[in-house]
Image (cartoon, helix red, strand yellow):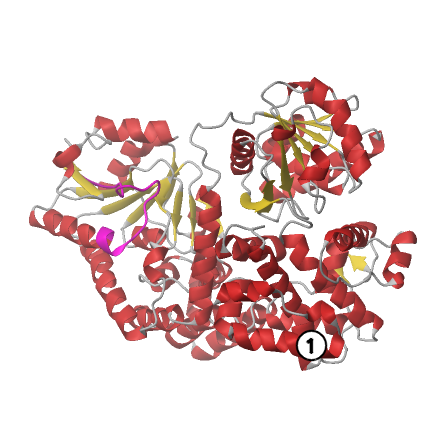
Amino acid sequence: MSGEIIEALERMELGPDAGAAGGPWRHWRLSRDEEGLAWLVADCADAVVNTLSGAVLEELDQALARIEQDAPKGVVLRSAKPAGFFAGADVSEFVGRRDAGEVEARLRRAHAVVDRLERLAAPTVAVIHGHALGGGLELALACRYRIAVGDAELGFPEIRLGLHPGLGGVARTLARVEPLQAMELMLKGKSARARKAKALGLVDAVTEERHVRAAVSAAVAGGLRASKADLKTRIQERVLSAAPARRLAADRMRAAADKQAPHEHYPAPYALIDLWEKHGDDLAALRRAEPASFARLLVTDTAQNLIGVFLLHEKLKRLTRTEGAARPVRRLHVVGAGTMGGDIAAWAAWRGLRTTLADPEPRAIAAAVKRAAELYPKLGRDMAKTRDALDRLIPDLKGLGAGQADLVIEAVPEKLDLKRRIYAEIEPRLRPHAVLATNTSSIPLEDLRAGLQRPDRLVGVHFFNPVSRMELVELVGDGGADGEALAVARGFLGVIGRLPAPVTSAPGFLVNRALTPYMLEALLLMQEGHAKETIDAAAERFGMPMGPVALADQVGLDVCIAVADSLRERLDRPLLEVPESARARVRAGALGRKSGRGLYVWKDGEPVKAKDFPAPPPEMVDRLILPMIDACLECLRKGVAPDEDVVDAAMVFGAGFAPFRGGPLRYARAAGPEQLRARLEALAEREGERFRPDPGWACLG
């Protein structure tokens, strides 16, 4: 696809070498073809993807002024970037904004540019390949027609940043898409592929790159019929134009939003619903009200923290770009077909890697393949893609795939002797360039290297459960790890769409080191007589997506206990003992979600919780959350993580730390390090030395 796009633009002298002929701008090129069409091509300088920054919008305004001087037959707006149309706004420009009046003024100037595009006399056509997200989709919606190429992806992810569309997108979407579907699209922040987008009314045609010129010509000539609402949509729009009906629908939306995103933590969904409820019958008024609403959201702590989390995500994602410095992984071999090993293999096969899965137990491999067959349709809803992924997932009872693999991942239980025995069997069969990786969750790499012929080729790739949903992978190295081996692992994580958090070898690494006291404290609170629902509610009210009791079940009680026991042997500070009641559950086979019962009974993948339970006392949040932050600061002090950004990113993406708080260290800075440290000291006096603050609090100044 990307090659076709570049070739098409080069034929029109709009490719990368167009130079000054394309206009006096850094981010746009303008040219006219033999049919009299103006091609306005976005190609943001020094960037892999297009984003809407202030400079990009300013140059767009200048290009539109030039077009107005000599009206063409039609105007085609598209991108020269292989990745897509526009990835959205340049989020870095939002950082630190605290003056709502200034933000609103800037936004209204941006509105004027987009409105100018909409007012052009000539027919305008947005040709969308790849992604058109956020502000990029808002720009496309200002054109008269939208043509999606191939499997283009359109959507409004702003809600994940604590915002809603702000360039006129709310009103323009409501003008084209059935109201309830339009609101759902914006409230959920999900994307729609090309054909779904056409069904919704976001695009007017779907075609392939080779047919783009014909589709553009048809649109400009009036031969492409713009999407129109069907009878059902028109009836719904008429009903919802009445304030009482809209108010009722808005109340239902608020109730649904509150289950996922409480207003006190995430105000954006409610601001968007308010806009629609108040102005849904007057889209011009809605468009005028949109900038002020967006500005009020942008200056909140929630939006600023979520924007910070987005930038952390991009920082980790950049680590996977090895740029040819490391041999790419084309074949993967996984040893251990348990929950983690089987799911790692399944995910890698889904992402396109030929993957062999070895285990001495045929039943374990069969169970892993069965889980993959159940997972794939949920991921892609594409029978051909599911079939291909299952073809790439190869059962390997004899472990022959190890000798052909570029990367071998060991994912067997947390037993040092077992892992060493497997390495002794596998290492002699590895190819010279192959990298050996371990999915250990707590054992230091220096303990695992003993006896290896190539100890420098061992790295840690610690995945989190469930593998298909958790983006973060701790990439574990130390002084004994070869730089090229780590680069291979980073590149592999990029191929399978995962984020590497670089950490050094240490007990529990970072995420498990921080989560273990959190979950152990929850078990102690249960032993003290508190309801498990009360304990989970305390954490959820702080903003955690899942409470520690449910999390222990999700991870697996057996895994939690093994990690806690391993940490207790290696840490130089007190750690709670696992209550005997939890060990008894494991002995009885109550392992958590994977066995259907643990601390909770699990049904359809969810814990069954009592509806009525006591409210958590105020101190409970401190007992759960502060030791987690303290452990993060200990890891920072000891150099387990290289900087605060990696700590915050790892805890948000690997442990689910309340995203709207920006990460544990960002939260600690905002809440006041001295105040939090004093609360820990008070807990230490009442509850014991496990709460004594680590010297790492000095890292926050």
Q: Residue at x 61, y 29 (%)?
A: 456
> Does the magenta run of residues contain 635?
no
> Does the magenta run of residues contain 44?
yes
* Picture coordinates of residue 145, whole percent (x, y): 30, 47
Q: Quadrant of residue 285?
A: bottom left
* Picture coordinates of residue 543, whole percent (x, y): 59, 68
Q: Quadrant of residue 408?
A: top right
* Picture coordinates of residue 380, whole percent (x, y): 58, 41
Q: Residue at x 68, y 23 (%)?
A: 453
Magenta segment, which residues? 38-56
Few, some or many residues within 10 Å of mark 1 (<14, 14–19, 20+): many
For mark 1, what is the residue? 683
Residue 427 seen in the current view: yes
Quadrant of the drawing holding the N terminus: top left
Q: Residue at x 42, y 69 (%)?
A: 238
Element marked by disc 1:
helix
Q: Residue at x 77, y 37 (%)?
A: 412
Residue type, mark 1 in image: Leu
